[in-house]
Image: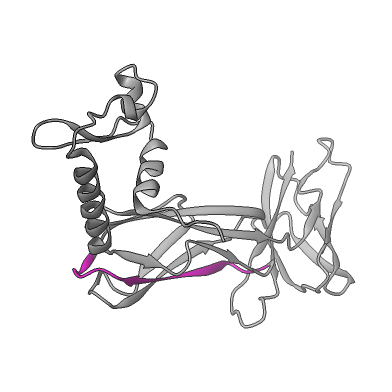
Amino acid sequence: MDEVPDDGFLLENLMNKSSDSIYFKDRQSRFIMVNQACANKYNRASPEFVLEKTNGYSMMRGVLIALLMIVSLAQGGLEWEQKEIAVEVHATQLSADALFRFTNTGEEPILFSSLKPGCGCLTPSLSKRTCPPGESGELIVRFNLRDRTGKQRKSMVVNTDDGASVSLYTNTDIPTAYTIVPKLIKWAADGSETNKVAILSNPNKEPIRLLTVTSSHKGLPAELKTVREGFEYKVVMIRQSDEKNMRSVIRITTEPAPGKKTSKTLKLYVHAP
């Protein structure tokens, strides 16, 4: 069986990983613990060359390690059940929630001082602003999915009044509901064309029905035609006016995901010079 490293070894290893100079002295200003960065500062090959090897060194080092371990254990703080969550979403879903659970393992109440989303698409919601000792709570992070597709990794930084700062992450792979070809439709400048067509294709295995289509310009109305229910449609645009430089946004509503009441709206753009 491998030997378990003692607390002193773990503390020294942690100190030596820091690029900052860290040291501790006794009342006679003798070094009793230093890290490698501190040794480098004094042009020494290793921490041992900085330490003054007195009879009290070993005892003082042991006392220091014990005190540091006691302080660390006494502090406690918030323990998070998970710090990174994968969120599965439907192609037409407008938002998704990630639930982060926490527990106060310390002996003092902890106040959330700030919640800093790494993206304007995230909205945090706490079950309690102050968490008493021994109690648990939840942080819900709502992700606005509206115009996003593909893999998304978002962060939320949580700061508390005990000085702790924790980064939480959500991982989401947002499916594309429909591909639209072309997404920008432009009429010929000579006015010879009357109708234009865009093809909408669902790349997913599950069907997604398209429900309605509207145009923002009355001179460029649109019709939705089914090619294969839930998988392929045509949007036919008609130029009904001789007005010059007409522009329109075509909006197509999608079928809501199971259990949802709202859904994404697909868009394509039209220009008739």
Q: Magenta segment range?
A: 92-110
Q: Which percent across, then down, holds residue 243?
A: 71, 45
Q: Nearer the viewer, residue 255 or 247?
A: 255
Residue extending farthest bottom: 259
**Horizontal side of residue 160 vs 171, given as left or right:** left
Camera sees residue 117:
yes
Q: Which percent across, then down, holds residue 144?
A: 53, 61
**Image height of 21 relative to 225, above or below:** above
**Image height of 93 relative to 242, above or below:** below
**Horizontal side of residue 52 vs 16, given as left or right:** left
Residue extending farthest top: 43
What is the image's colouring?
A: one colour
Residue at x-position 28% and y-position 25% = 50
Residue at x-position 37% and y-position 30% = 36
Q: Nearer the viewer, residue 193 or 205?
A: 205
Camera sees residue 162:
no
Residue extending farthest right: 227
Quarter of the picture holding the N terminus: bottom right
Residue extending farthest front: 55
Magenta-drawn stretch contains 99:
yes
Residue 251 image-quadrant placement: bottom right
Magenta-drawn stretch contains 61:
no
Q: Which percent across, then down, holds residue 41?
A: 31, 20
Q: Nearer the viewer, residue 17 or 150?
A: 17
Quarter of the picture holding the C terminus: top right
Q: Which percent across, then down, holds residue 63?
A: 20, 50
Residue at x-position 79% and y-position 54% = 180
Residue at x-position 58% and y-position 59% = 171
